[in-house]
Amino acid sequence: MEKNFVRCSINKGGEIAPLIIPSELTNGTGLMNPSVMVKDGKIIVIIRHVNYTFYHSERKLFQHPYGPLTYIHPENDVHLRTCNWYCELSDNLDIEKFFKIDTSKFDTYDPLWDFVGLEDARIINWDNKLFISGVRRDTTTNGQGRMELSEIEVYNNEVKEVNRTRIELSTNLDSYCEKNWMPILDMPFHYIKWSNPTELVNIDISKALSRTVNVSKDIPLPRDLRGGSQVLPFEDGYFAITHEVDLFSSEVGRKDAIYYHRFIVWDKNFNIIKVTPEFNFMNADVEFCIGLAEYKDSYLITFGFQDNAAYILKSPKSFIRDFIYS
Amino acid sequence: MDRINNFEKIMQKDKLKSLLYNYIESPDCPEANFNIGVYYHEIGQTASAISYYLRAAERSTEDILMYEALIKASICFDSQGCRNNSVEGMLKHCVALMPKRPEGYFYLSRFYERSFRWSDSYLIASIGEKVSSRNPSKLRTKLDYPGFYGIIFEKAVSSWHTGLCEESRDYFKYLSIYEPLDKLHKNSVIYNLKNLKAWKDESNFYSFCRSKSQEIEMSENNLNLYYRKDFKNLKYNFNNCEHIDRNYSEAFQDIFILTLLNGKRNGTYLEIGGGLPFYGNNTYLLESKFDWCGITLDIDPESSERHFRDRGNVSVCLDAREVDYAYLLEDCRMPNNIDYLQLDCDPPNITYDILNKIPFDKYKFAIITYEHDYYIDETKSFQEKSKNYLEGLGYLRVISNISPDDNRPYEDWWVHPDLVNMEIVNKIINVDDSIKKSRNIFLLQ
């Protein structure tokens, strides 16, 4: 297993940059799980900002009073709130413009659950419209999670959410939490909902309903493959970065977790044809990648580090291919 | 919002990138984690900082790095607001890890004090006072830990609220006399001493220590002072000299300093043998009209208490022969180049002993007024000894045998050539054996 994918990439000509929104606008709390796309040659990134700080005692030496892994929200507000920042980056990965996405048109209700806002929003361009798509859990009193597709419009001095669609299921209606669906870049309104076995779904926006269009055969892996980045065309098929989680309890019964990532390659019919060994980006136990984009001779990969920091990695295509096929 | 791509921000980003690359090269290196944590902390990205601090603490084999990383993580949580359990948890780790270091006790006691948990605050301050070191080794970064007196201060506050009122008053009095407080703590101590009625009988206190107005009156009667009417006769003008109503020094020392430094504003001083805060005092004019600040030491508690109450400077009641000056100056965050050093302790052998304790290897002084008391020195040796010593350090004697009148040569005045304008020095310099009446040095007859 590679614990330091970023170092390998840098050694092969890659480059990394931190993604930061000034702390005057964020109170210094978590910036995490960024997503990336390239539109008209311009790098666009969505950064998730939360009102909490993730605390993770990786070696269990200095645990929090609440345990080794916990979310430190304000003690007078139990909600874990998310908002999203739209950013435009220069070629050298500096943030040139940033706007908090204005969601006020649709945020007209009191949240009904502790998790508030659109979480882990992947950015996509479908039918010449910009969308961000993630999970929302604040619309029901039991925290039921559903994927949402929000159309955003970019103006000179603001970015606004102009449409919001909560995607319901046509089967398995009682599913508690649908999240981390991976939008397919060149197939508008299609996602890989589940990676192994790979389940392809299509969205009917007018009905706000998803429908499974294909399920391919699963392959043996030690853990469930969960969603990750967008799905990009790759050679004669597709590829993406997925994640897996080892969830476990400490000896005194406190929850803990370790995350892993892999590249998955599909053929054009979404049969898995290649799975890389699992890897970490920068040696941390909790990292999360939801962004992958093609940019000139490189791929851009965005990921969160311990839910508290956001980074963008520019990695040569040749390195990614070698990594996948080595 | 457009990102302002100014030079500073580019430099900041480059610094962060450099730290990030160091981290990526050695992600299990405690220092690499700590350093990137410090940077994120400095730019207010406290969540990111906490992750790296925690990684540093858990990967280090050095208690001191773990300790500092955890303190800084607690400060990050504190700055985010409303994360009390996290602040407290981090600080408890610190105290458990290094119970002989004082910072953890200070922060934890202060945290409880600010949370109105008085008995917890008192408990932690009391333990800290008993078991932790007054002079701990240096940490890697600057914290807002004020010094050991911070623990005493927390104990003074919390003891009042736990009903230990006399103890509280005693601690505040102790702080007012014996500790070099920063401005924040000093103001708070004064406020508390008044409010807690620690000075019960104001009239007694004033009569005991005398008052500013008494001192002013006495100095006008007894000393040969400079007044505004003398301005036309001033030999060497300096910036804002026209605005001086009167001086306070016994022998024009304050005028000498201002002349050599051209009326410098915001200067710094170390006044050893402070005496009274106004009468014959060499720094009051500098402080009140030219915004200087500094430290005054005196062995007399009453004098120190007067300084503490009536002056803006740091006042310390200590035997000047027993002071660790390097520690004191660092503790008070004094710059390495200090504008003025007064050495004025009786008898002359004591002043000379103190001269030998000044850390001239770390600190330079633009001007020194050195009291050798030649006229009463039975050995007639200490002027020469001090001359040899200071010349050996590169200082230049500008005026010798200064006397407030015609027959009491008691001081030599020195400068460091690197820190003063030598043009004015060359106009004033006079180091022959004659007695120089101070008034005549600066005023036309």
Image: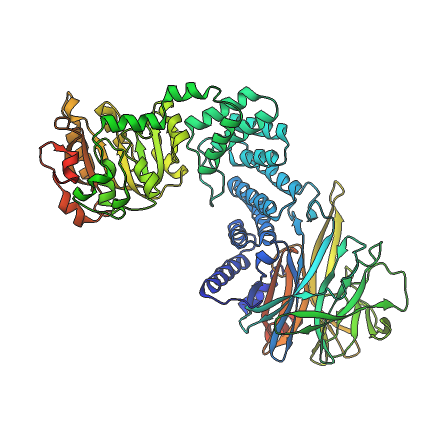
Give how far across and how far down residue A286 sits, in percent.
67, 55
Q: Residue at x 82, y 55 (%)?
A: A143
Query: How many numbered marks does the figure carry?
Result: 0
Q: Residue at x 60, y 63 (%)?
A: A311
Looking at the rendered image, the quarter that the N terminus of chain B falls into is bottom right
Looking at the rendered image, the quarter that the C terminus of chain B falls into is top left
Give how far across and how far down residue A291 sits, in percent.
67, 68
Instruction: Examine the image and state in which quarter residue B202 appears.
Output: top left
Direction from residue A284 to residue B37 in the image, left or right: left
Task: Answer above or below: position of B34 versus A121.
Answer: above
Give how far across and how far down residue A110 sits, in percent.
79, 56
Task: Answer above or below: position of B100 versus A173.
Answer: above
Task: Answer above or below: position of A304 versus B266.
Answer: below
Closest to the observer, B145 or B200: B200
Work out whether residue B393 can be spotted. no
Closest to the observer, A237 or B17: B17
Work out whether residue A276 can be spotted. yes
Give how far across and how far down residue B103 sits, in percent.
52, 36
Task: Answer above or below: position of A138 versus B353.
Answer: below
Direction from residue B185 to residue B327 in the image, left or right: left
Q: How is the image coloured?
A: rainbow
Direction from residue B302 to residue A210 in the image, left or right: right
Instruction: Examine the image and state in which quarter residue B163 appears.
Output: top right
